[in-house]
Image (spheres, helix red, strand yellow):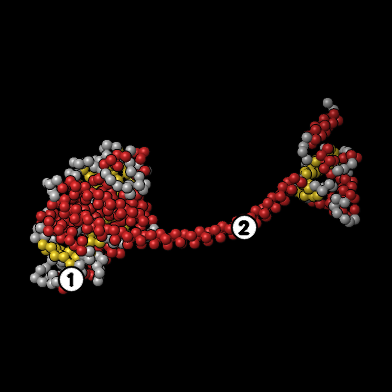
Amino acid sequence: MSDRENHQCDETALRLAVEHLGQGIAVFNQDRCIDVSNDQFQTILDLPPALCEAGTALADIVRHLAARGDFGEGDIDTLTQSRLDEIEQNTSGLLERSGPNGQFLEVRTNRLPNDGLVISYNDISARVSAERALAQVNQSLEKRVQERTKALTHLNNELERARAKADAANLDKTRFLAAASHDLLQPLNAARLYTSTMVERAHGTDLARLAANVDDSLVAVEDIMSALLDISRVDSGAIKPAISIFSLRELLKKVKVEFEPAAAAKNIKLRLVGADASVSTDRRMVARVLQNLVSNAIKYTPEGGAVLVGCRKRGNRIRLDVIDNGIGIDKDQHSLIFTEFSRLEPGARIAQGLGLGLSIVQRFGQALKLDVEVDSVPGRGSRFSIYLPPSAEALPASSPSNAAAQPASSLVGKQVLCVDNEQDILNAMQDLLKGWGCDVRVARSLKEISQNDILEGWVPEIVLMDYHLDQSSGLDAIQWLRQNVGGHLPAVLITADRSTQVQTLAEERNVSLLPKPLKPAALRALMSRLT
């Protein structure tokens, strides 16, 4: 094949290639005359066919466009030369120009190796329209965002005011519950003292079962009220963690004093092990968690079973365990047991309650940022654990107390002063303490102690004091008694006020504290230890 034929083949292939492109293409040689162009080139620029034929000079095409007004008003020769210079200077560049029919054209120029030039025209009108539409949408959207932001700001202000009202109402509710619980717990406390006395005196008679049933019902009421009050205080933020360093051994000792009588009543062995550790967290909240877990363990463990309370080191934390061999919980139901008022069928058949104890455990754990863990197998028992942060400071080991081991019979003949502004409670306490063999004297206030010469020739060995007295607080009354009798005088503050402030004041004044309604077994154990 000759060179001429080869050239013709190359030219034909090039023409076929540019015809199938979606852009207007014109290829110019080094003399700036058309070698080849496609139909899109003619269509987009709206050129006469003669200006699109091979050999047509670029200058003629540009002059035609200038004369037509594509480049604006002005001298045609000047406009033509300016456009030609622009094309030469912007090779490999990108320009946007208005087309003859008002369309937007994207113009690209690229120089060829033989110094030729390729000029492409692409109709971008749709893209420009889309961009303009998008700009309008953005402008409209920005306006809508501003309007919506203004509306949301107004709504947030309304919500903030509503939240403030809700917080105030919640705080009022907590205060009301605290006040109402005190008034409700007072007669409940007297009722429990009376029933406990009845249980002890009716032992071995037909009335024993009835008295025990009444006492169990009162215990259920007490547990429900205490749980509701705790939940209300946590949810309202009334309970604020007070971080301190304390010994787990001392905490477990108090738990044993409180729950050993209940465990003994069901012939359950309550063991405390591995408590040689000090931790840094809120002692009272941890104590409440532990009380709920131990109470549940005893409640759902059959007679003759065992409950183990202990701690062990796990990594950089101390794990406090409450382990029982009770009814156990199916793994699929582990998440349900921490929900308020959720009681599983096996447990509901064994013991009364509303299912609030573990909800309090979870709430207190969250408030203290402590992990709560449960591992349980139906029919074999459960392990509930809380993970505590160890203290960097070690507490000095406390010496064992011989008084803690004294039996309840050691109360016989003990001189006990009981002070409460409720006469029903005084009568019930007097009956209960006399049943234990105590020498009891009662008063409703310090004024009555003085007027009746109660301390004349008689010195109390322990004082049981209500917190809310008519003329003074129970703590101030204890301080007055210690000044007159002796600073060594053991004292127990008995109150329905569960606030942190009262607990802190009692600790600072070395006064033991028991909540109302009073658990007689816990009182007897504490009195034995203190005397």
Q: Nearer the viewer, residue 444 or 236?
A: 444
Q: Residue at x 36, y 38 (%)?
A: 332
Give the x, y percent position of residue 335: 37, 43
Foreground pick, 31 / 297: 297
- Cα separation, mark 2 vs mark 1, equals 72 Å
In the image, farthest residue toward the front: 206
Give the percent coordinates (x, y) of residue 293.
28, 48
Residue occupied by mark 1: 448
Q: Nearer the viewer, residue 78 or 467?
A: 467
Q: Which mark is residue 147?
A: 2
Picture coordinates of residue 24, whole percent (x, y): 80, 41
Q: Residue at x 22, y 66 (%)?
A: 421
Local SS, label 1: helix
Q: Nearer the viewer, residue 291 or 457?
A: 457
When the figure is inspected, residue 387 is found, relative to residue 499, above or below; the finding is: above
One can see residue 460 in this view = yes
Are the residues flagged by discs 2 and 1 in contact, CB closer than 8 Å?
A: no
Could you say whether the residue bearing mark 2 is in a helix, strand or loop? helix
Picture residue at 84% right of the left edge, 41% below the top? 43
Q: What residue is shown at x 12% (from left), y 54% (from top)?
A: 408
Q: Quadrant of residue 118?
A: top right
Q: Nearer the viewer, mark 2 or mark 1?
A: 1
Mark 1: few, some, or many residues within 10 Å (few <14, many ≥20)?
A: few
Q: Amino acid at mark 1?
A: Glu
Which of the 4 image quadrants contains residue 237? Answer: bottom left
Q: Specify the amino acid type for callout 2.
A: Glu
